[in-house]
Every structure is written in C-alpha cells, then in structure tokens.
Image (cartoon, rainbow, N blue to C red):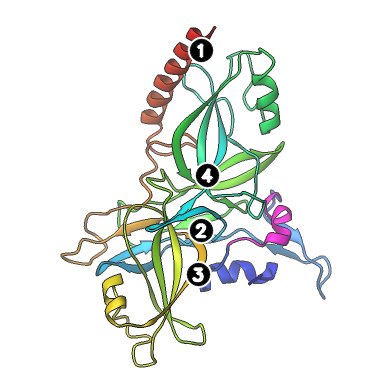
C-alpha cells in the first residue's frame, strides 16, 4: 500500500505497522529541514508538516507485556534462513579525531526506498587528522576521496551494527510504558550527499536475523488486538497476519506465539520486515510496567553514531579502537 503524503503521519500513529515514509516523495520530505513541504491541493500554498511522533505501543511477548516502537518497514532481507530472514546492513561513516572526540556528524549514502537501503547500519570509523575542521566531510564521496589521496584520513570498518532509521526532521519519540529504564531512541543529525538528514538511534543490533511478530485481527484486515512478538534477540520482525473469529477479536487473550499456534488460526506469512525495537518488557511475575526491563535492541550507552547518555564509555571505546587502527596502519606502512 502506498499512503498519500498527508495520510502518512496519521497512519504511522493509528496503524501498528504502517510505513513511516512515502517512497515516491521521501527525498522531498526527508531533506526538508523545516519539517514542512508545500502541498499541491485545493488550498494552494498550504504547508503540511511531516515530522512524526513515534510513540511506543503495548504488545505481548510470552505472556509478558511489552512496549515497542513502530519505526517502519524499510529494510529488505538479504536472504532467508529456517529461523528468520537476514536484514542486510549498509555502511555509516562516523568521523572521529585521534583523541576520540567527534570530527563531525555521521554520513550515509542511502535514503529509505533507495535500492539497497536498510535501517541496519554498519559502523565505519573515519579517523580524521586534527588539522581538519569539524564537519569537513559531508558525503561518502568526500571521505573516499580524502582516504585515497594520502591526506591521513583512515576508514576502519567495524562489526558494530546499529538500528538507525532515517526520519523526517524534528521527529520525536515518546515512551508510554511508565518505566524509568525504558529504551528511548534518540534523535540525531547526519549528512547525506552533502545535505543534512535526521535519524533515530535505537541502539545496537544484537542480531540482524528476524523473529516473528503477529498481527491479530478479522478477515477484513481490521486489527483488533495488541501485537504478539516472539523472541528478544532483535528489533526486526517478520510480519504475520493472524485471522481470528469475531468471538476472539478484541478480547486481548492471545499473549504468546504458543497460544496463537494452539488456536489453529489462519496465519498469513508476509515478506514485510518491520523495525520495532522494544522499549520495555515487563517481568513475567507481575506484568507491570515498573519491573525490570529487557530490550531487544540493546541500550544507547555504546553509540558510535550520536551522543547518548553513555558518551564517556563510547569515547573510551573509540579511543581504544583508534589506537588499534593506528597500530594496524603503522604495521602496514
């Protein structure tokens, strides 16, 4: 389904897994720094704002209440395995000076709906000589040119994967679980081919192999009950549509994959992969939102892409990595 641009923000809130972007107009929307683009309609000159508030919603995992964010369905699987699809990753260039301080905003080369785009980003550290000013590089081409001309710029690919969907400027995130330990993705500015872009950093991706999530609803497609997730290893999920009879719809009695399978309901397995990091999972003992939390996408305390609350730990890690890169570079000289 292709949503109209105006219906987009409404759909992102009202439908559990509605896409958060529009492919045919995404660059217009995503690169507009004011968060507003002029719409051609009866009211000529009117402004339609596309910044989105991503609010967590409550679902279930193994009879436990779980709160999640719907960050859209933009990632294409690279291949499938018996246990789930593998979500491909794309590079993000993260500039740092040798002392571990940031040398500028992170750089990407793809937007949602571009061929090969994914919300899973593989962190590539770009070591920038201290003589370069902040944000000297604003495109992947700039970095590649500098790295190839003996300027002292080095690119080090890491194995770190992060969940960082591109979003419209000035978008916000709200968690409604009530937990003080909930994961809340943070808003970050970056660069795309020389122009600013915004994204959310939802933390480390433990694995890019998907788990299943189940829509529960009627045969006409109406969703009637909270989503049911299976597994805690990833923020990426294969979407399955479960059709239940009217006697079950709206009763909120299906809380686990096992219960869905036991009911022998019709299940339509789709090829859609949704990005739904969990903000908080309640303890199985009490099912309240004030007990210990479990996150499927890690925490934001080791980010190499932005400035989370744990920036000190990140900086120490980066300095260590930079030192290792320096040692390798020395050996290769």
Q: Residue at x 66, y 70 (%)?
A: 2
State the SS at label 2: loop
Q: Earlier in the sequence, mark 4 or mark 3?
A: 4
Name the mark on residue 270.
3
Q: Earlier in the sequence, mark 3 or mark 1?
A: 3
Give the labeled residue for mark 2: 71
Q: CA distance from mark 1 to mark 2?
A: 39 Å
Q: Earlier in the sequence, mark 4 or mark 2?
A: 2
Name the mark on residue 329.
1
Choose top left, top right, bottom left or bottom right for residue 320: top left
**Residue 138 visible from this viewpoint:** no
x%, y% of residue 130? 58, 14
**Residue 303 visible from this viewpoint:** yes
* Residues rendered magenta in the picture: 20-31
Give the labeled residue for mark 4: 89
Q: Earlier in the sequence, mark 2 or mark 3?
A: 2
Q: Earlier in the sequence, mark 1 or mark 4?
A: 4
Q: Earlier in the sequence, mark 1 or mark 2?
A: 2
Q: CA distance from mark 1 to mark 4?
A: 26 Å
Mark 2 neighbour density, 10 Å: few (under 14) some (14–19) many (20 or more) = many
x%, y% of residue 39? 78, 65
Q: CA distance from mark 4 to mark 2?
A: 16 Å
């Amino acid at each position: 389904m292709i949503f109209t641009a105006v219906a987009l923000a409404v759909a992102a809130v009202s439908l559990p897994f509605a896409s958060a972007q529009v492919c045919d107009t995404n660059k217009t929307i995503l690169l507009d720094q004011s968060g507003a683009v002029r719409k051609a309609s009866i009211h000529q000159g009117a402004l339609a704002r596309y910044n989105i508030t991503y609010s967590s919603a409550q679902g279930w995992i193994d009879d436990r209440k779980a709160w999640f964010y719907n960050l859209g369905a933009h990632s294409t699987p690279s291949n499938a395995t018996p246990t789930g699809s593998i979500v491909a990753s794309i590079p993000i260039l993260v500039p740092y000076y040798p002392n571990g301080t940031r040398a500028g905003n992170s750089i990407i080369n793809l937007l949602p709906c571009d061929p090969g785009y994914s919300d899973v980003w593989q962190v590539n550290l770009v070591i920038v000589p201290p003589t370069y000013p902040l944000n000297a590089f604003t495109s992947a081409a700039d970095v590649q040119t500098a790295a190839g001309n003996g300027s002292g710029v080095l690119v080090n690919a890491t194995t770190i994967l992060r969940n960082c969907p591109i979003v419209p400027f000035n978008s916000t995130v709200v968690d409604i679980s009530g937990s003080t330990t909930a994961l809340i993705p943070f808003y970050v500015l970056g660069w795309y081919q020389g122009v600013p872009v915004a994204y959310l950093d939802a933390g480390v991706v433990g694995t890019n192999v998907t788990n299943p999530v189940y829509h529960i609803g009627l045969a006409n497609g109406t969703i009637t009950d909270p989503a049911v997730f299976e597994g805690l290893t990833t923020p990426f999920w294969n979407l399955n549509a479960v059709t239940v009879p009217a006697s079950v719809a709206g009763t909120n009695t299906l809380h686990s994959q096992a219960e869905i399978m036991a009911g022998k309901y019709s299940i339509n397995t789709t090829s859609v992969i949704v990005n739904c990091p969990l903000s908080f999972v309640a303890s199985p003992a009490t099912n309240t939102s004030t007990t210990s939390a479990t996150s499927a996408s890690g925490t934001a305390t080791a980010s190499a892409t932005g400035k989370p609350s744990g920036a000190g730990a990140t900086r120490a890690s980066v300095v260590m990595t930079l030192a290792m890169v320096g040692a390798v570079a020395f050996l290769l000289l």
